[in-house]
Amino acid sequence: MAACDRQSADEAQQQENSAAAKPDEALSGIVDRSQAGTPLPEVTVADPTGTTLDLAKAGGKPVLLNLWATWCAPCVAEMPLLDRLAAEKADSLRVITVSEDMKGAELVVPFFAEKKFAHLPQWIDPRNDLAFGMGGGASLPLTVLYDTDGKELWRVIGGFDWSSDEARAMLAEADG
């Protein structure tokens, strides 16, 4: 499985610039439907300006929730794809990216500036409450699709090619 395995938060966070993986390895995530029906988590995240988002109230249209970190190679590999997806699907899908970097805005803001992401939000969860609460504390990226009612349809553990036909077919499940 192509995901960043975090055995210890301290060691994982030391890998700030270790995001180098082969694209085919970085984007070979595993689809898991075992948590279908689970509601959006009751966790509040913040952006670098201090604005907050209550995830449980983020519905209204399908939500693609992505947990990532700057030190995670598969995360970094899929972020440009998520940025393009967010632009393409802005009217029909809300893409929410949440950084699990313990240094928060200190790493996220320059990362977004360097990569020139224009369509992804900079939500931050430096205590990793969200990742551990969703059972994803050991592997990043973790991406979950929720329907318009805020119920989980599926999750992908590891990086994924969000431009692929497979991804498009899976995302279409939220429309029906």
Image (cartoon, helix red, strand yellow):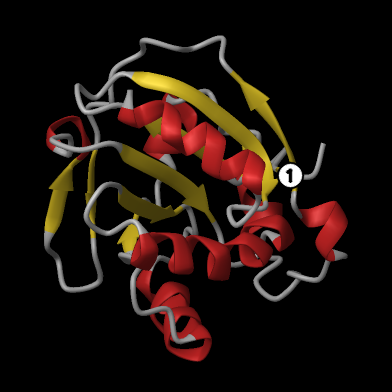
Q: Residue at x 66, y 48 (%)?
A: 160
Residue 103 visible to the viewer: no
Q: Is residue 66 left or right of residue 46?
A: right
Amino acid on which the number 1 mark rests in the picture: Ala
Q: Quadrant of residue 109?
A: bottom left
Q: Is residue 134 above or below residue 160?
A: above
Of residues 73 and 169, the one nearer the viewer is 169
Say which residue label 1 marks: 3
Q: Secondary structure at mark 1?
A: loop
Residue 26 percent coordinates (x, y): 78, 55
Viewport quadrant of the C terminus: top left
Q: Is residue 79 left or right of residue 83?
A: right
Residue 14 percent coordinates (x, y): 68, 65
Q: Is residue 70 above or below residue 135?
A: below
Q: Residue at x 68, y 65 (%)?
A: 77
Residue 161 visible to the viewer: yes
Residue 75 percent coordinates (x, y): 62, 58
Of residues 110 and 21, the one nearer the viewer is 21
